[in-house]
Amino acid sequence: QVQLVESGGGLVQPGGSLRLSCAVSGFTASSYAMSWYRRQAPGKERELVAIMSSVGGRRNYADSVKGRFTISRDNAKNTVYLQMNSLKPEDTAVYYCRAFVGGTEYWGQGTQVTVSS
């Protein structure tokens, strides 16, 4: 059974850092592209934040987070991370982990990140 479970969200001051985790079960994360999305407000569409390919581990980022966020993967733990530095109030959102496995799209439940002083 495929499961994606995010953790690591919380309240942080502007300029601070957080590391989100996405614990994967039911498939091997390194065999598929893994991505992080966020929804900044209810009713707003989820936007792609970062994606990591399976082959070669190539990474791509939204322009709004480039240079501040880093996606990575720990194959031994079958976990994907999103390191977020220099956080801004506009990074406030629910962050989701996503995978596309065997023709099916899977999402985690999301973790809330709030950037505020």
Image: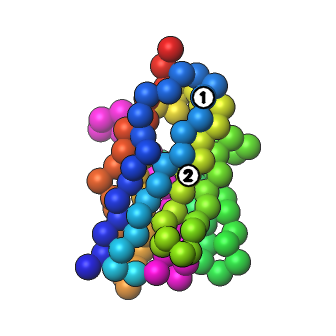
Q: Residue at x 37, y 45 (%)?
A: 111
Residue 45 at what x, y percent from top left? 38, 45
Residue furthest to the front in view is 76
Residue 55 at what x, y percent from top left? 65, 81
Q: Residue at x 35, y 64 (%)?
A: 4
**Amino acid bearing label 2:** Leu
Q: Which residue is mark 2?
A: 82
Question: CB atoms at circles 2 and 1 under 8 Å apart?
Answer: no
Q: Quadrant of residue 63?
A: top right
Question: Does residue 110 sit above or below 91 in this rendering?
Answer: below
Q: Badge 1, how many Cα within 10 Å: few under 14, some, many 20+?
A: some
Which mark sits nearer the N-terminus, 2 or 1? Answer: 1
The quadrant in which the N terminus is found is bottom left
Q: Which residue is mark 1?
A: 16
Q: Observer-nearest residue: 52 or 46?
A: 52
**Amino acid bearing label 1:** Gly
Question: Does residue 17 sit above or below 1 in this rendering?
Answer: above
Question: Does residue 35 sit above or below 87 in this rendering?
Answer: below
Q: Which residues are magenta?
A: 28-44
Q: Looking at the rendered structure, which numbered label has been put on residue 31?
A: none
Residue 56, visible in the rendered structure: yes
Residue furthest to the top in view is 117
